[in-house]
Amino acid sequence: MSYLREVIAKTEEKNPAQPEFIQAVEEVMLSLEPTVERHIEYVASGIYERIVEPDRQIIFRVPWVDDSGKVQVNRGFRVQFNNAIGPYKGGIRFHPSVNLGIIKFLGFEQVFKNSLTTLPMGGGKGGSDFDPKGKSNNEVMRFCQAFMRELYRHIGPETDVPAGDIGVGGREIGYLYGYYKLIRNEHTGVLTGKGLDYGGILIRPEATGYGAVYFAAEMLATRNESLAGKTAAVSGSGNVAQYLTEKVIQMGGKNISLSDSSGTIIDPEGINLEKLNYLMDLKNNRRGRIKEYAEKYPTSQYFGGKSVWEVIKEQSIKVDIAFPSATQNEITEDQALALVNNGCLCVSEGANMPSTPKGIEVFIDNNVLFGPGKAANAGGVSVSGLEMNQNSMKLLWGKEEVDNRLQMIMKNIHAECQCAAEAYGFERCNYICGSNIAGFLRVARAMLAYGII
């Protein structure tokens, strides 16, 4: 058994019943094999063993009162994974599926994603098994305040700076930050994704989606291709999917799909700006279901209880570019094969680890350009890092300047992935190994400098 397989085995033994976390660790560790031979100092200092162990794991009770006066109890989490290169940084997720293993997988991925941006941010993640769907604004507010009553002890602008994630948008960030400000009696950059009126940054909601498209464009350019005239499939219908669709339109492509937990819509004519504006109002303001899109636009078809990738497989729909942007492990081996058979030439992950290991194998074996989430969806945390800079300097950059900075960061991430892959014996287009190695090396060098802590 190789050294890194021993690290994986020990991690699995220590973290039973946490499949998502083990999956993430295995994917990263196996791609780091060439670094073991070249950097024996990392082995001697236990860098590999230390980097898979969080600095701390915080679990807490969140009691709150619903509109009927009944006391509800949820569980809250914050995993502060690694702060070697900066304060812990990572989103807060509110979803019934949230558990310690999922938060650890997300925090572990965040370490390398944040490193790739070259901004001074460590990796962390948090959340709760609270489900904001179907809750009133007052219920969401009361829950957020109860959540922050514990979380505030563990965060700070130079310690840990959370942001939003699934189930945590502008409304939730406002409630969370308002209560933090009340408790601490200070106005500081402790959360990102804030509203523009109280310390936010322009295009933060757009950043993850825009970044995934910018990364796809960089990958396509290596084969003298562009998004213009291409058909895209996007899963999800939150911020990432919405603004990803917007940027695809702006760059001359056509998105034909969106989804939520209830089902999928396929619109062969493409989701234009008028339809996208309707979708944004439906999801962001009325908090409706994706089925209503199909009722509004008869050119589309609704598939209840099915994911985008299931529908593409069953209906043999031609797709040039896939943007999985909903949740982890949403593209299986069979669905990946269906995408390949239907002409897919590029996958840019808008979500965290949305493709299963077997699905990724299919893409790689068939020479599909594959942008893993830690690289392709790093646009969101990149702009969050810029928001932290803004807050420190007490200023506000214009939209064009932020977008230009985002584009440059995504270009640099793409180049870093290529260079790292090539330097350690892989093909330049192996973005999985390239992103893992490039992200790891910066963190490892900092950990080595600190000694054994």
Image: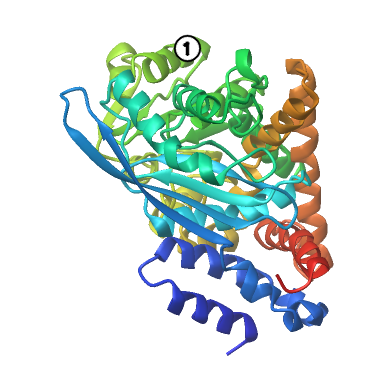
Q: Is residue 313 above or below residue 291?
A: below
Decide if residue 321 is on the left or right side of residue 436. Answer: left
Spot occupied by residue 82 in the image (x, y as percentages of width and height): 64, 58
Mark 1 closeness class: few <14, some 14–19, many ≥20 residues within 10 Å = some
Which residue appears at 47% of the width and 68% of the height?
A: 22
Instruction: Identify the residue at the far bottom of this view.
Output: 1
Which residue appears at 47% of the width and 63% of the height?
A: 21
Q: By what rule are the colours in the image chosen?
A: rainbow
The answer to whether one can see residue 3 in this image is: yes
- Residue nearer the viewer, 364 or 11: 11
Spot occupied by residue 322 in the image (x, y as percentages of width and height): 53, 41
Decide if residue 217 is on the left or right side of residue 229. Answer: right
Viewport quadrant of the C terminus:
bottom right
Image quadrant in which you'd find residue 438: bottom right
Amino acid residing under circle 1: Asn
- Residue nearer the viewer, 80 or 12: 80
Image quadrant in which you'd find residue 225: top right
- Circle 1 residue: 277
Q: Which type of secondary structure does the marked residue at label 1 adopt?
A: helix
Spot occupied by residue 249 in the image (x, y as percentages of width and height): 59, 21
